[in-house]
Image (tube, helix red, strand yellow):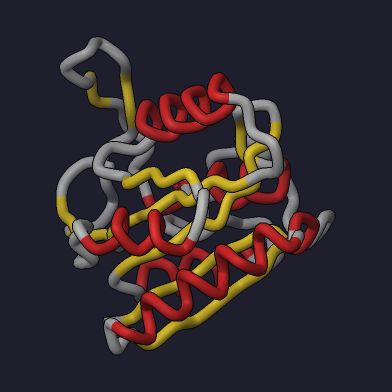
């Protein structure tokens, strides 16, 4: 199994290092091959909303920055882990850029979800399982709830974990299925 880990280079605190170490140890115990990417401030541009990834270069952003390689490596993995600093209940700006720029992997149409909201249908038959692991120092419960709710609202089937310690992370990950998924994201 191939696991891809994406993290924010600006938030590599002691808490992050503990989280990353626990995750890599868990993946090693599962005999996973691991690739990693860390995104720094200014390395990725924000999505311009130009639709070029749908009409000019289907499946790939027209902006030439590291996002094409990040998306390619994610799509080639069985599971992608996003180590997300939680800032005011949201992703950090660097992680938000990575998540927003996932758009080329979707089609430009809209489908209506059972709850009445709309989403883009999938471009491909299968996608890597996705696990968002949020972390931060002195997080308020409201920040954790908001992070979980927003993540679940925007991605079907995503797993969300809030990092507390290695033991809890191991328990949470132990029950997850790390295999490619089909259908809507």
Residue 8: quadrant of the picture: bottom right
**Number of numbered discs:** 0
Q: Say above or below: 168 vs 89.
A: below
The quarter of the rendered structure image containing the C terminus is: top left
Q: Which residue lies furthest to the right in this view?
A: 42
Q: Which residue is drawn at 48% across and 51% down?
A: 133
Q: Position of residue 111 (x, y in %)?
A: 24, 25
Evaluate whether residue 53 shows in this view: no
Q: Which residue is drawn at 23% across and 66% down?
A: 178
Q: Which of 79/127 is in front?
A: 79
Q: Position of residue 17 (x, y in %)?
A: 66, 68
Q: Which residue is drawn at 27% across and 37% down?
A: 156
Q: Where is residue 63 in the image (x, y as percent from the top left)?
A: 68, 57
Q: Which of 52/71 is in front?
A: 71
Q: Say above or below: 19 vs 55.
A: below
For this view, does 91 lie left or right of residue 120?
Answer: right
Evaluate whether residue 42 shows in this view: yes
């Amino acid at each position: 199994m191939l696991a891809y880990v994406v993290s924010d280079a600006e938030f590599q605190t002691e808490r992050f290092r503990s989280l990353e170490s626990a995750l890599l140890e868990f993946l090693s115990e599962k005999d996973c091959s691991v690739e990693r990417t860390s995104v720094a401030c200014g390395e990725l541009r924000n999505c311009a909303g130009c639709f070029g990834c749908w009409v000019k270069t289907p499946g790939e952003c027209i902006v030439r920055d590291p996002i094409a390689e990040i998306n390619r490596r994610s799509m080639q993995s069985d599971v992608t882990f996003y180590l997300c600093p939680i800032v005011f209940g949201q992703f950090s700006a660097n992680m938000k850029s990575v998540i927003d720029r996932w758009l080329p992997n979707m089609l430009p149409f809209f489908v209506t979800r059972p709850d009445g909201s709309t989403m883009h249908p999938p471009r491909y038959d299968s996608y890597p399982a996705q696990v968002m692991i949020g972390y931060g120092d002195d997080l308020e419960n409201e920040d954790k709830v908001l992070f979980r709710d927003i993540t679940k609202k925007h991605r079907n089937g995503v797993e969300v974990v809030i990092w507390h310690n290695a033991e809890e992370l191991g328990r949470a990950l132990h029950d997850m299925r790390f295999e490619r998924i089909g259908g809507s994201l």
